[in-house]
Amino acid sequence: MRVDVLTLFPEMVEQVTKVGIPRIAAEQGSLQVVARQLRDFSGNKLRRVDERPFGGGPGMVMQPEPLALAVAAAKEACGADAPVLMMSPQGERFDQRWAQRLSETPSWIVICGRYEGVDERFLEAEVDAELSMGDFVLSGGELAVMAMIDAATRLLPGVLGDAASAVEDSFSVGRLDHPHYTRPVNWRGKSVPDVLLSGDHKAISEWRLANALGQTWLKRPDLLAGFELKAAHHMLLREYLNEYVSQWPDK
């Protein structure tokens, strides 16, 4: 997977391949991140890529021509079919489905916005999709892009030590993950659930599914609206909720 990032702060984006899973992927040759300095395409001595907005108002707006030239250079390297993405608070919410989609895309181009925004004519002419990390505003798109790269990279074949980790992650199957426990068995008066120590793989599997459904119902019930609950799911969820109410009657 090749990602060309168009940014005013390439040194910031380049850090994503220095640690963790993206570093492993880069060393394996599964991931290549190319950070392009937008000022290299400014066409003026001051290397400016922004101007005041027509109609007045605060802040500056990124100009269309430097952005278009940067996209052209990226497409020459990535291929003409490489999708062009723009990080924007107005964009579609980035989620696990997008991470999966990008992990299956051999090369993609993403632009990190800055200032008050980007000339609308550039968006209409060059951008295939605008993406957002949520209903909040960052100083620029760099941190959001780094999160996207990390999310997509961990889905690449052979990158994780155990491929099942990505399959069982929260959101990968439309619900949250189940709780996890490790040694010691007893910690500050709290014990690991007996079923996880039983060695009964069928019972453990059912416990994990019930708790995943229960955690989703408690923390992100909106996710269950898009999750196909079968009869077995309903039964496990009822059992979880009955036990939850017995333990926490005031909640």
Image (cartoon, rainbow, N blue to C red):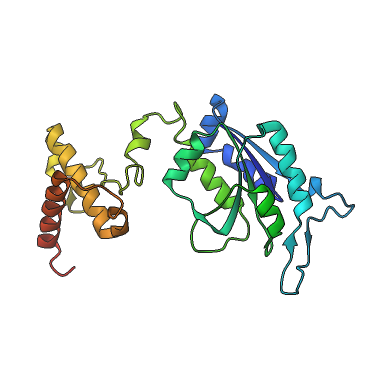
Could you tell whether 100 is left or right of 46 in the image?
left
Towards the viewer: 189 or 96: 96
Rendering quarter of residue 46: bottom right
Residue sitting at x 31%, y 51%: 226
> Where residue 180 sits in the image (x, y, percent)?
27, 44
> Where residue 57 sits in the image (x, y, percent)?
72, 74
Could you tell whether 36 is left or right of 199 in the image?
right
Residue sitting at x 14%, y 44%: 232
Residue sitting at x 74%, y 38%: 73
Q: Looking at the image, how many numbered discs can be counted on the residues?
A: 0
Rendering quarter of residue 33: top right
**Location of the N terminus (image quadrant):** top right
**Location of the C terminus (image quadrant):** bottom left
Q: Is residue 169 above or below residue 124?
A: above
Residue sitting at x 75%, y 68%: 53
Towards the viewer: 149 or 191: 149
> Where residue 118 sits in the image (x, y, percent)?
69, 59
Q: Is there any visible trace of residue 196 in the rendered image? A: no
Could you tell whether 161 is left or right of 250 in the image?
right
Q: Is residue 76 above or below residue 38?
A: above
Rendering quarter of residue 173: top left
Towards the viewer: 65 or 34: 65
**Residue reaching furthest to the right:** 45
Q: Is there any visible trace of residue 79 in the rendered image? A: yes
> Where residue 74 sits in the image (x, y, percent)?
70, 38
Q: Is residue 71 above or below residue 78?
A: below
